[in-house]
Image (cartoon, rainbow, N blue to C red):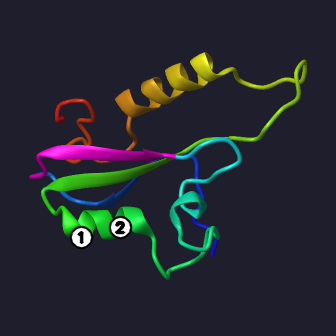
């Protein structure tokens, strides 16, 4: 089962949470595979955003995935400033129930 997906995904926490923690992978990474102990997208051995959610139940823990391929100079791709702006836009328009979203209203 491949769990690497694009966009924001709630890992743990609920509406009563006091803070949001968002894991964002780097180049060549994935929303789940980067945070697994063995680097695969289907590992269930230790997905540490989930472990953090268990350790900090007062926080909502999210993972944010995006296309993160490496391009050569001159090849089409999204520069980091545009990628950051795209991510911010997506965080403002989270496609989850309004009662659980509200990214940016908590620390």
Residue 103 lies, in percent from the top left, at 27, 35
Q: Using the rendered view, name the quadrant where residue 106 is placed.
A: top left
Bounds of the magenta segment: 16-24
Identify the residue shown where x is 18% and y is 35%. Answer: 107
Identify the residue shown where x is 89% and y is 24%. Answer: 75
CA gap between label 2 and label 1 equals: 6 Å
Identify the residue shown where x is 69% and y is 41%. Answer: 68
Question: Please, what is the dominant secondary structure of the magenta stretch?
Answer: strand
- What numbered label is drawn on residue 54? 1
Are the residues flagged by discs 2 and 1 in contact, CB closer than 8 Å?
A: yes
Residue 62 lies, in percent from the top left, at 37, 51
CA neighbours of label 1 inside 10 A, class few (<14), some (14 to 19), many (20+): some
As helix, strand or loop, the secondary structure at mark 1 comes to: helix
Q: Using the rendered view, name the quadrant where residue 93 is placed.
A: top left
Q: How many numbered markers are drawn?
A: 2
Q: Note whether 60 is above or below 90 in the view shown.
A: below
Judge whether residue 23 is colored magenta. yes
Q: Looking at this view, is 34 or 67 the one in front?
A: 34
Residue 61 lies, in percent from the top left, at 31, 54
Is residue 93 something that shows in the picture? Answer: no
- The residue at which mark 2 appears reads as 50
């Amino acid at each position: 089962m491949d769990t690497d997906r694009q966009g924001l995904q709630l890992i743990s926490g609920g509406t009563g949470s006091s803070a949001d923690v968002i894991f964002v992978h780097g180049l060549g990474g994935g929303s789940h595979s980067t945070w697994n102990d063995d680097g695969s997208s289907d590992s269930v051995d230790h997905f540490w955003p989930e472990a953090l959610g268990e350790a900090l139940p007062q926080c909502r823990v999210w993972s944010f995935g995006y296309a993160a391929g490496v391009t050569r100079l001159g090849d089409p791709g999204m520069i980091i400033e545009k990628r950051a702006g795209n991510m911010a836009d997506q965080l403002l328009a989270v496609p989850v129930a309004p009662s659980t979203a509200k990214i940016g209203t908590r620390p």
